[in-house]
Image (cartoon, grey):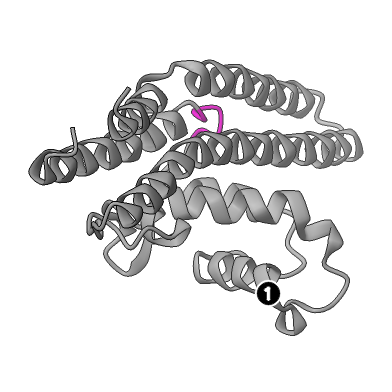
Amino acid sequence: MNIYLMLITLIRFRAQSPTLERVLTSLGAAVGACSEAITQAKESRDPEFIETVVEEECDVVENLIGAAFVAGQAEITGVISPVMRLHKRAATDGHILTSTDGTKSGIMRLGTPVRPSLPYSHVEVINAFANYFKHHDEWHVRWAALTGLAKQTADTIMALGATEGSTGNLRKGIEVLGIAKKYADLVNVSGMVSDWANAVFTTYESELRRLGSI
């Protein structure tokens, strides 16, 4: 089978897969249950009880949003891998693909920024906050002293509104994506990943057809 056709087909499969939507629908339902628990607690009119429930449920919501970011990141990685293989194979055959520069960051940058004032695509936001969720407990120094990928992650999420010491950074991340009024709408993240994956597919398919590779 044509290796280029095989790889572009893998990208299209990822773009059309319903898996992420199903996962995020479940996570969103769990966030909704947390919101309902807070609403019920407020009906007690017991300030101490309300404070305890709000604190606990908000912690759960943060973790659920973090899980949503990680699930999105897994799908993003599933697209990036065959794209990088496309670049490697094309280089072997004497072609330099130009749809992106072929790096992870370059591939994620394909698409429109989340806001005109922020030079980050939706998938870059998802990826950065996923890395934060997975690794921030390992950051044993002030963010200003971080190095490598940790520094890159911290710099990105701070540019997006996250702050050191905040217990709501993942909620801030989901708000940057436009999900501010109802955190239970996590399923919207799947559409952002799918739109990007489709853009990657159509862009590379067009380039490969121009080259006569598929």
Q: Which residues are magenta?
A: 182-186
Image quadrant occupied by the N terminus: top left
Specify the principal SS of the magenta part.
loop
**For this rendering, which residue is in front, 119 or 203?**
203
Asked if the stretch drawn in magenta spans residue 92, the answer is no
Q: Position of residue 212 (x, y in %)?
A: 11, 39
Q: Which residue is located at x 57 percent, y 64 percent? A: 157
**For this rendering, which residue is in front, 130 or 74?**
74
Q: Is residue 201 left or right of residue 132?
A: left
**For this rendering, which residue is in front, 113 or 9?**
9
Q: Say above or below: 79 vs 21.
A: below
Question: Can residue 63 be seen in the rendering of this structure?
Answer: yes
Q: Position of residue 83 (x, y in %)?
A: 38, 44
Amino acid type of disc 1? Gly
Image quadrant occupied by the C terminus: top left
Question: Can residue 168 be seen in the rendering of this structure?
Answer: no
Query: At numbered mark 1, what does the secondary structure look like: helix, strand or loop?
Result: helix
**Of all residues shown, which one is farthest toward the bottom?**
145
Q: Which residue is located at x 50 percent, y 64 percent? A: 160
- Image quadrant in which you'd find residue 45: top right
Q: Position of residue 46 (x, y in %)?
A: 87, 32
Residue at numbered disc 1: 148
Near mark 1 (Cα within 10 A), the count class, few <14, some 14-19 or many ≥20, is few
- Image quadrant in which you'd find residue 213: top left
Q: Which residue is located at x 25 percent, y 60 percent? A: 96
